Image (tube, rainbow, N blue to C red):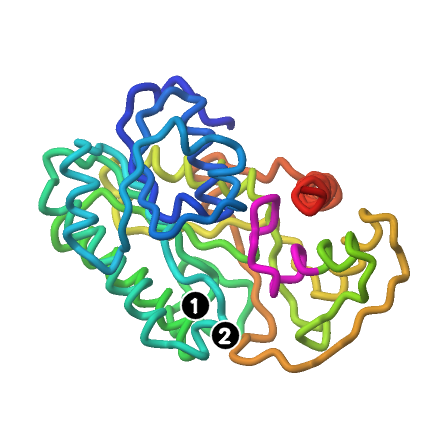
Amino acid sequence: MAVDPSAWSDRRVLVTGATGMVGSWLTRWLVEADAYVVALVPDWDPQSELIRSGTIDNVSVVNGRLEDYGTVERAINGHEVDSVFHLGAQTIVGTAHRAPRQTFESNVQGTWNVLEACRVFGDLVQRIMVASSDKAYGAQVVLPYTEDTPLTGRAPYEVSKSCTDLISTSYAETYDLPVLIARCGNIYGGGDLNWSRIVPGTFRWLIRGEQPILRSDGTFLRDYLHVDDIVDAYLHLAEFADRPGHRGRGFNFSDETPRTVMEIYEACCAVAGRPGTEPLILDEAVGEIHDQYLDSSRARQELDWSVSVGLEAGLERTFAWYTDLLAD
């Protein structure tokens, strides 16, 4: 079931993490749906899709960081926000391993700042969607993860996402806050500027005519979803946040077809017209869970959500975006 854009017309929406890959495309969708969008922007990145596309010219920008409660409060209260998409976070596993304090401040403190401001201005805020990750489940013997799988993160990034989810549930159950949690695997698509990730990194090397590099041994197993399906998932979820019986719940989003890093690498090479290109395999991934993938039965049954972008089509769109970016 497609999300009806007219339902978002004139809503006043805060998007944290608006300059990130998902945040950029979500913000564009909301602007095109005639929502009044407030973007929380910590740093100016001219390569961000939010800025490159000109979408930023059609939103209200609040400069500041999630770690500063006053900034978050100003964004919500000053703009009379009724809907919140909390995407802002430090999202790189390796960065979390090197700098856990920064990650905890951004992901954990940032989350309670957003939810506390929503609680304080509960007369304004009607729905909150918190973007989490499959990493919140930690390493598990039984796969795929379901929403009943315990949140047992151990490495810094995993713990930051486990805490994000637990804090969200706490606010929902204690203060009846209208919040729901989205857990996804690996997201790919145009706008991802984290070159250490398999899809953007591989495409950049191929476009430049260089040998691609794999940080892992290529056997790590993951879900992969195109950013368009993630935007659709977040919008679906937000529509249910204010309904009794849903508050505080988590939902998994996946195409339920886990693939190895090597399979994704080979698919990228095929789309780029470079099949058979041999990568340099470093086998030095640190702090990564080996196998992770999700069961999305709850989202299919309760939200009527389904994947619409297949892997080949998604990679073709993504390759075209990076070809355009790197030609500039």
Task: Name the residue located 71 percent from the left edge and 73 percent from the top edge.
Answer: 219
Q: Quadrant of residue 199?
A: bottom right
Q: Quadrant of residue 281?
A: bottom right
Q: Residue furthest right?
A: 276
Magenta-span inclusion, residue 122:
no
Residue 78 x, y percent position in the rendering: 15, 35
Q: Vertical placement of 123 versus 250: above or below?
A: above
Task: Name the residue located 77 percent from the left edge and 53 percent from the top edge.
Answer: 268
Q: Vertical placement of 256 versus 242: above or below?
A: below
Task: Name the residue located 60 percent from the left edge and 48 percent from the top edge.
Answer: 225
Residue 139 x, y percent position in the rendering: 49, 75
Question: Horizontal placement of 106 versus 273: left or right?
Answer: left
Query: Pointer 1: what residue?
Result: 137
Classify mark 1: helix, strand or loop: helix
Q: Vertical placement of 167 versus 128: above or below?
A: below
- The front one of 211 and 32 is 211
Magenta-span inclusion, residue 197:
yes
Residue 44 x, y percent position in the rendering: 41, 48
Tell me the magenta residue range. Answer: 187-201
* Quadrant (top left, top right, bottom left, bottom right) of the C terminus: top right
Task: Name the residue located 42 percent from the left edge and 41 percent from the top edge.
Answer: 234
Give amino acid for label 1: Tyr
Do residues under tags 2 and 1 come within 8 Å of each other at their CB atoms?
yes
Question: Horizontal placement of 170 versus 207: left or right?
Answer: left
Alpha carbon separation for disc pair 2 and 1: 7 Å
Note whether residue 135 is visible: yes
Query: Pointer 2: what residue?
Result: 140
- The front one of 148 and 81 is 81
